[in-house]
Amino acid sequence: MNLPNRKPTRLKNYDYSNEGAYFITICTYKKQKLLCDIVGEGLCALPSIKLTTIGEIVKQSIEYIDSNYKGVLVDKYIIMPNHIHLIINNQTGGHGDPPLQVYDIIGRFKSFTDNKYGDTLWQRSFHDHIIRGEKDYLKIWNYIDTNPQKWKEDCFYTD
């Protein structure tokens, strides 16, 4: 059986247990709009997010990361209709036995929410960006903040 060759998604030779901030994007399976609706778009109203039932479970699961992984914080996140963005701040510095890797946290998060959903909720893998400095961090923070307002121009937008 010939399987397609997958392009590696992680940075080669980088230790993802290193202390630092990571920008993570996870898309729903087949980019289905399952997590929320963008509402309130109009002349004066700024768009806001109305979470679905599974969107609420995703929110609780993101907040679980903060309270249950010592030294790991979710600094910022946004739940969009078919994807989520997170800034994960790993303060463990590679300590622990074994050291906590960002992809371990995301894998557990995805597995838990898949089980709660009762089906495959997420696409395979996820996109990560190692945040390099304050300017990069602030740019990503702003991107997350303004994501609902730019939903119709978003690369993940579908009608």
Image (cartoon, rainbow, N blue to C red):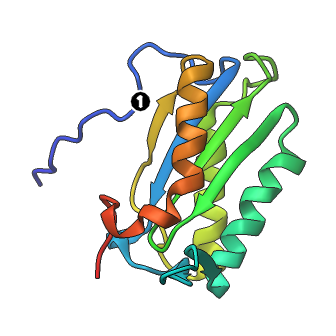
**Rendered residue at 66%/44% (across/down):** 105
| Horizontal arrangement in the rendering, residue 67 relative to residue 40 (left or right) | right
Q: In which quadrant of the rendered view does residue 88 lie?
A: top right
Specify the farthest residue to the top. 13
Q: Quadrant of the N terminus?
A: bottom left
- What x and y, as percent, mark residue 23? 55, 38
Q: In which quadrant of the rendered view does residue 82 lie?
A: bottom left
As rendered, which of 145 and 102 lies closer to the eye? 145
- Against 158, residue 63 (above or below) is above
- Against 39, residue 14 (above or below) is above
- What x and y, as percent, mark residue 106? 60, 48
**Rendered residue at 55%/75% (across/down):** 47
- Against 37, residue 16 (above or below) is above
Q: Which residue has dot 1 on it?
A: 10
Q: Secondary structure at mark 1?
A: loop
- What x and y, as percent, mark residue 100? 71, 30
**Rendered residue at 63%/69% (across/down):** 113
How many C-alpha atoms fall within 10 Å of the one at disc 1: few (<14), some, or many (≥20)? some
| Residue 103 visible at all | no
- Against 39, residue 16 (above or below) is above
**Rendered residue at 14%/48% (across/down):** 4
Q: Quadrant of the C terminus?
A: bottom left
How many marks can you see? 1
Specify the farthest residue to the left. 2
- What x and y, as percent, mark residue 86? 61, 48
| Amino acid bearing label 1 | Arg
Q: In which quadrant of the rendered view does residue 21 lie?
A: top right
As rendered, which of 104 and 66 lies closer to the eye? 66
| Residue 20 visible at all | yes
| Horizontal arrangement in the rendering, residue 4 relative to residue 34 (left or right) | left
As rendered, which of 62 and 49 lies closer to the eye? 49
